[in-house]
Amino acid sequence: MKADTLLAFVGYHASANDRILTTAAGLSDEEFLATGKLDHDGAFQTLRNLMDVDWSWREFCIGHNVGNTCAWDHGFVPTLHAFCLDEDKRLRKYVESLDDAALLEPLATGPDFAVPRWLILAHVVNHGTQHRSEVARYFTLLDAPVLKWPGEPEKFALTG
């Protein structure tokens, strides 16, 4: 995968994260914290998982193996949306720092297994798409559809 292509996906990921969390802010606490609704129990838990995967895999890619901890275990998450905005900026800055050769560099995810860095980063974006879609469906059932993306496709890829 080329660096500019991955950067476009990361830009979309950030924009979509912001939209889903902006919609979440309009829900009641009862709706947002309801359990038994989604794969990770509810909207809050699912979005928290999405953000944690973003954080933990980015940390892994820069050489900080956080193991099985979550971002929340480190006590630096004031709010989910604020954390997401900050983490999306960190991810974008990280991807901007990579050239095509760095994206191809294999990273060991186990004792006898390594994958190219770009594949881990693509997983982050795809994982986000899966869970945003799941949460968006739940929000639609609550009559709180997720905001549409703004105008032309190039806007989401180049801003954020």
Image: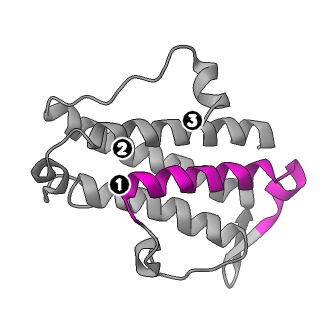
Pointers 2 and 1 in contact (CB under 8 A)? yes
**For residue 21, which numbered disc appears in the image?**
2
Nearer-N-terminus badge (2/3): 3
Q: Residue at x 63, y 31 (%)?
A: 159
**Tag in front: 2 or 1:** 2
**In x, y percent, where is residue 150?**
49, 20
Q: Residue at x 67, y 35 (%)?
A: 8
Quarter residue 21 falls in:
top left
**For residue 12, which numbered disc appears in the image?**
3
Which residue is at the far front?
78
Q: Secondary structure at mark 3?
A: helix
Pointers 2 and 3 in contact (CB under 8 A)? no
> With respect to residue 22, does 74 lie above or below?
below
Q: CA distance from mark 1 to mark 3?
A: 16 Å
Q: Residue at x 39, y 65 (%)?
A: 78
The residue carrying pointer 1 sits among few (fewer than 14), some (14 to 19) or many (20 or more) residues within 10 Å by Cα, namely many
Amino acid bearing label 2? Leu
Camera-side residue of 136 and 83: 83
Apparent side of residue 138 relative to residue 71 in the rendered image (left or right): left
The residue that mark 1 highlights is 47
Q: Residue at x 47, y 58 (%)?
A: 83
Q: CA distance from mark 2 to mark 3?
A: 14 Å
Residue 108 lies in the magenta-colored region = no
Question: Which quarter of the figure is the C terminus placed in?
Answer: top right
**In x, y percent, where is residue 82?**
44, 54
Q: CA distance from mark 2 to mark 1?
A: 8 Å
The answer, for residue 2, to whether it is visible in the render is no
The answer, for residue 90, to whether it is visible in the render is yes
Q: Magenta region: which residues?
A: 78-106
